[in-house]
Image (cartoon, rainbow, N blue to C red):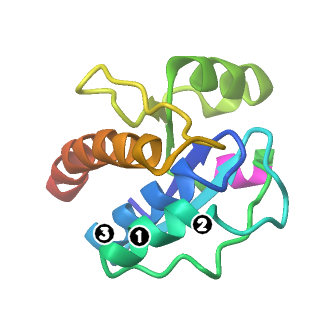
Amino acid sequence: MKGILVLCEGNICRSPMGAALLARGLPDVRVQSAGLNALVGSPADKAAVELMRERGLDITGHRALQVTRAICQDADMVLVMDAEQRKRLLEQYPEARGKVFRMGEYTDLDVPDPYRQPMQAFRNSLTILDVGIQHWLRRIQRL
């Protein structure tokens, strides 16, 4: 596994946090994030930055990126936040079939979007991200 794409909606909340956590667990894998409707060029949400800082991760340099065919093709795996995002991504880029999975694939949990919600919503989303990432890390490290 050389590259993983973490995808959410605006690419300022969930996917930057997920990508940072995955990258820490997979130091030899290129992990990037993007959004289906990215707020292109925007920094990570302040709440996401704070939560990552609490974990010793710095995402202040993050800037939102719109997903493209090239980004999808370049990734060996794409992790999305929910089934609807998976469906939409595959409608746009059907050639990605077979490598797009939900972050909560093995827990059957979607990661809710905390955008414009209180800090507790970010914490809840991060808890679900943590569980999904731990499952994926175990599976990927076995490869």
Q: Are marks 1 and 3 in contact (CB under 8 Å)?
A: no
Taking the spot 36% from the left edge, 64% from the top edge, the residue there is 21
Main SS category, magenta section? helix
Say which residue label 2 marks.
46
**Residue 141 locus on image (x, y percent):** 19, 58
Q: Amino acid at mark 1?
A: Met
**Residue 20 locus on image (x, y percent):** 44, 67
Q: Nearer the viewer, mark 1 or mark 2?
A: 2
Say which residue label 3 marks.
26
Mark found first going from the N terminus, 3 or 2: 3
Give above or below for 28 relative to 124.
below
Give above or below for 74 relative to 56.
above
Using the image as rendered, state which of residue 34 and residue 56 is in the foreground.
Answer: 56
Q: Nearer the viewer, mark 1 or mark 3?
A: 1
Which secondary structure lies at badge 3?
loop
Say which residue label 1 marks.
52
Classed neighbour count for the residue bearing mark 3: other residues with Cα under 10 Å, few (<14), some (14–19), many (≥20): some
> The N terminus appears in which quarter of the rendering?
bottom left
